[in-house]
Image (cartoon, rainbow, N blue to C red):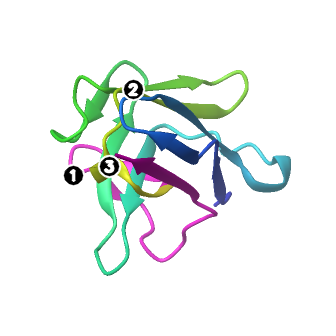
Amino acid sequence: QVQLVASGGGLVQAGDSLRLSCAGAAGRAPNLLNWGWFRQTPGKERQFVAAIALRHTYYADSVKGRFTGSRDDAKNTAYLQMNSLKPEDTAIYYCAPIRIPSMTPVNNDDWGQGTQVTVSS
């Protein structure tokens, strides 16, 4: 399995936007059926954010209406457009292959590099 690397995080203010990207590490093509976005804050378990299937994208209730997941299969890349960011969105964001409809990672023991998103109030 190709490890995935998330990028595009940063420090923003509440109400701002960020766009995260996810691609295979070392330029390798993951060729995923379903792309998943997860996030984790210190002391808490990783939580589901979005799942991008071929024809539909699923979202956690906490981000619905604010986040938009997309994919470019020609580039073997997935994206997470995050609008109207809130301080509670502060977390390390990861991408990984995901199982639908359980919205769980295919391999919970293999996580690539995440990207830090910090939203100040």
Residue nearer the viewer, 112 or 32: 112
Which numbered disc, 2 or 1, marks the residue closer to the eye? 2
Give the residue pinned by disc 3. Answer: 87
- Give x and y (percent) for residue 21: 62, 37
Residue 35 magenta-highlighted: no
Q: In the visual, does 58 lie left or right of 71?
A: left
Look at the numbered discs 3 and 2 and tell me whether their residues touch, using CB distance below 8 Å: no
Which residue extends farthest bottom? 43
Mark earlier in primary sequence (2, 1): 2
Which residue extends farthest front? 121
Give the residue pinned by disc 1. Answer: 102
Circle 1: element type: loop
Residue nearer the viewer, 34 or 115: 115
Residue nearer the viewer, 90 or 105: 90
Between the residue at mark 3 and the residue at mark 2, the CA separation in whole angstroms equals 12 Å
Provide the residue span drawn in magenta.
Answer: 94-121
**Numbered badge on residue 53:** none
Amino acid type, label 3? Pro
Q: Is residue 121 above or below residue 85?
A: below
